Image: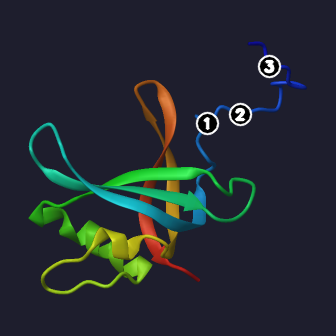
Amino acid sequence: MRIDIPSFDDVKTGREPVPAGIYLSICESGEVKTSEGGGKYVAWTFSILEGDVAGRKLFFNTSLKEQALWNLKGLLLALNCPMDEGGFATEDAVGLKCMLVVDIEEYQNRQQNKVTNYLPEE
């Protein structure tokens, strides 16, 4: 079936990285996964809330290895997500907002976004 549209000229594929910067974002999901090496991590999905790139997704992981928990704690603090000595629930982070510091890096000959820091919502 043929579908007629006005033009593909201004349609972006979504593969272009967003410009480096700081973006107000909302947590859409956090899913615990296991790496090929057997390590556990949380795969996060955030959506940018403002500006020309509103609605674009940012994806990143935080390791659950003991020596990397500082990174996860930083994100949870920026989100003001409830946590205690026993841990936290990923679903408690969903819907919370923070500022994500985003850079651009090259990976496999392609530019992509990299979340480098988390800040509390202003």
- Residue type at mark 1: give it: Glu
**Front residue of 81 and 24:** 81
Q: Residue at x 22, y 55 (%)?
A: 41
Q: What quarter of the picture does the N terminus occupy?
A: top right
At which x and y percent is residue 69? 19, 68
Under mark 2, the amino acid is: Lys
Helix, strand or loop under label 2: loop
Q: Callout 2: few (<14), some (14-19), or many (20+) C-alpha neighbours within 10 Å?
A: few
Is residue 75 in view from this perspective?
A: no
Q: Which residue is painted at 69% across and 65% down in the image?
A: 50
Secondary element at image label 3: loop
Residue 121 picture quarter: bottom right
Q: Position of residue 110 (x, y in %)?
A: 49, 28
Q: Is 53 on the left-hand or right-hand side of 76?
A: right
Please say whether residue 103 is visible from this viewpoint: yes
Q: CA distance from mark 3 to mark 2?
A: 18 Å
Q: Which of the 4 image quadrants contains residue 89?
A: bottom left
Residue with the mark numbered 3: 3
Q: Quadrant of residue 51?
A: bottom right
Provide residue 54's location: percent of width, then percent of height: 68, 57
Q: Residue at x 78, y 13 (%)?
A: 2
Q: Which mark is residue 16?
A: 1
The CA distance from mark 1 to mark 3 is: 25 Å
Q: Which of label 3 and label 2 is nearer to you? A: 3
Looking at the image, do the residues carrying marks 1 and 3 touch, with CB atoms under 8 Å apart? Answer: no
How packed mark 3 is, by other alpha carbons closer than 10 Å (few <14, some 14-19, many 20 or more), is few
Residue annotated with mark 2 = 12
User: Which image quadrant: the C terminus?
Assistant: bottom right
Up the image or down, 85 lies above or below 67; here it is: below
